[in-house]
Image (spheres, rainbow, N blue to C red):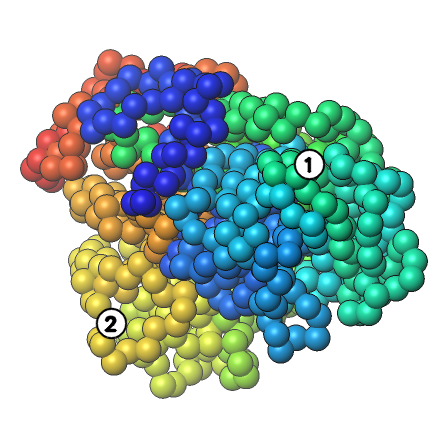
Amino acid sequence: MPFKMIRTSVVLILVASLFFSCQTNTTETMVEDTNLASYVNCFVGTDGPGNTYPGAVLPFGMVQLSPDNGLPGWDRIAGYYWPDSTIAGFSHKHLSGTGAGDLYDILVLPYNSRFTADLWPEQEHYRPYSMFSHDAEAASPGYYSVDLLSSGIKAELTTTQRVGMHRYTFPADEESKILIDLGYKLNWDDPTDTYLKLEDETTIVGHRYSRGWAPDQREHFVMKLSKPIADIAFYANGKKVDAQEANAKYTKAEIKFKSEEGEQVLIKMALSSHSIEGAKKNLETELAHWDFNEVVAGANQAWNEYLSKIKIKGTQEQKELFYTNLYHCFLTPSLHSDVDGFYKGADGQMHQAVGYNKYDTFSLWDTFRATHPLYTMLCPDETVDMIKSFLSHYDETGLLPVWSMAGNETFMMIGYHAVPVIVDAYFKGIEMDAPKALEACVASANEKGRQIDQYIKYGYVPATGEGESWSVSKTLEYAYNDWCIAQMAMDMGEQEVYDTFAQRMDYWKNLYDPASTFFRPKDVDGEFILPFLAKDYGPEYCESNAWQYFWFVPHDVQGLIDTLGYDRFSAKLDSMFNYYPKPEDKLPIFSTGMIGQYAHGNEPSHHVAYLYNYIGKPHKTQEMVRRIIDTQYSLEPDGYCGNEDCGQMSAWLVYSAMGMYPVNPADGVYHLTSPTVSEATVKMANGKQFVVKADNQSKENKYIQQMFLNGEPYNELTITHQQMAEGGELRFVLGNMPRK
């Protein structure tokens, strides 16, 4: 079956009787759809470098219940890889689109006497698995199903915010089984202490503590079965124990029963980072019943509520691309607190979020660029809670999060990019404790670690000559973060703070080399380090090279233009997209989606196509943004050219399809380009609607001829968030010839 047909069948099979589904067509349709979730393709990104998962999750949900192929490796970093044909089980925690191999907590697998081969025979612990085919697999937002071909069992998954729900349909078999494997591990993840206990005839409780990318992860759970447990065996470190519980590094339990043909067994698995009692409260509050179809319908409704924050007019293909990407924007951050607010904090202690939801899984080096600005536009309540989550992290550690997950700080990547998220939200009127937020920003900007102290001392981060110091990238990103702090301090009347950071925001100039016209690493004596080749991926550039990081001065693009001069800047920008790597050049794994030296598969390049607007060549922005959309995104499993990265790759598409992008993510200004959808109605955070329309929309008509804001001619290349928040309409008239 062709891939697109597999995806479409999900909706037809699952929700046709509950919701209106749209007919496939290639013509434009007015958006009167009641089931926008039907346009989402959950398998996009599961092949290639996208690293997404296809399983069941709610917007910003705690549980990500998804199949694991059971094999390690970069391609399987999210647990699932489209080319694989095995399923080792269904685990309840996954990362979306990252390069980090962590989580995969609480694996469950139904199987029987038909197939008992070991997926990893060389390992000490026996691990059953099943073969599967994409022809018998389906997914839609909040739902996943697959036929386990090795056992004849049909597996279906759905979820609430904190509770995963399984429905297994068994064939007749004398030895049907359900495995709960807490010793299961993959990639970077490794359990440290696991516990299982049979509490009553339908209830198993326990915990899984582990380390990996996040060093101190704790998942407590309560598991309820719809069928009484008559025969169960517990194992500790591979050995069967003569007890109704097991506590060891590796534990598992195997439930055995005789199944009738077509018999269904349901499982409810509630999680909590705080305690088993917390998991029980989550279960009692969110899923007291056993109606699987009701949970599926609730998940579908929740997704439609979020997806309907932007309603577009366009072709079927345009809608599928747009809503698939909007869907991925809402997978993270992840809910971290229980229904009563308790959670495990980054200091290893238990805390309570009072009056807000505690979120975690903040991939801030990626998401500060476009994903969080999108949240300030569409999700004001969640943004309030995210800022409070930042400040609770500050209370627990003395710093804002860098890349936090599962109640841990990983310190992955660079910058202190919670700062632009806070500052952007502050200027857009998002409720927060502003004095405390500024205090936290300043504290994070004065941290002694991560070479921030050297940055303050020298005015740049000096190259160490030892491994990855990312010194040039750190200098540029710290300077941008400092600009953000200066703007907030100035608005709040904190003159001393403003003066300090207004000086630091210009430190980007200290690594500019006029001879090469690039930012280059310096030693502690202020000398540029040799040798230097701009296209090389050296240790002083974070997942990039000098070409890709040259453009990261989003707070002072005009200053960068003035530094080079208009003509050199313009020529260099053209070269960015025309100077291709040679066949013999060795590109790292993160340099994907290449157009010249531009790498759309990694975040530092994401704003660059919009820089033509600054030099009076907007037609080139319009050409390049269309080219990126057409060549770097698709509806196939390999539909992302790089890691999807917790919504950033998708947020770029969502913004660009509407004809705008936040080049500086904290100044509330969107640079304009030609939309790829004919109409988009955005429900702004204040409830007002802002409509984007594109007359003469087509693949050929990619050039803006005229613009009208609320019926009046509009000649700016930007629009502000405040203008959009007032409601109204921005109309583009497009044509097939550049208007220079």
Residue 125 seen in the current view: yes
Question: What amino acid is at disc 1?
Answer: Leu
Q: Which residue is mark 2?
A: 581
Front-lying residue, 111 or 623: 111
Residue 115 drawn at (x, y percent)? 59, 60
How many neighbours does mark 2 have within 10 angstroms: few (below 14), some (14-19), or many (20 or more)?
some
Residue 261 drawn at (x, y percent)? 61, 38
Residue 348 drawn at (x, y percent)? 82, 55
Q: Which residue is mark 1?
A: 266
Q: At 24% across and 51% down in the image, what residue appears?
A: 631
Q: Is residue 239 left or right of residue 595?
A: right
* Residue 278 placement: quadrant: top right
Residue 157 seen in the current view: no
Q: Is residue 437 above or below residue 713?
A: below
Residue 447 drawn at (x, y percent)? 68, 61
Front-lying residue, 486 or 155: 155
**Dot placed on the residue nearer the N-terminal end, 1 or 2:** 1
Residue 403 shows which numbered tag?
none
Task: Name the outermost residue toward the left.
Answer: 737
Contact (Cβ within 8 Å) of mark 1 with mark 2:
no
Q: At 43% across and 51% down in the image, what residue appears?
A: 133
**SS for callout 2:** loop
Q: Is residue 347 above or below residue 312?
A: below
Q: Is residue 144 left or right of residue 617?
A: right
Question: What amino acid is at disc 2?
Answer: Pro
Q: At 22% across and 23% down in the image, what residue appears?
A: 28
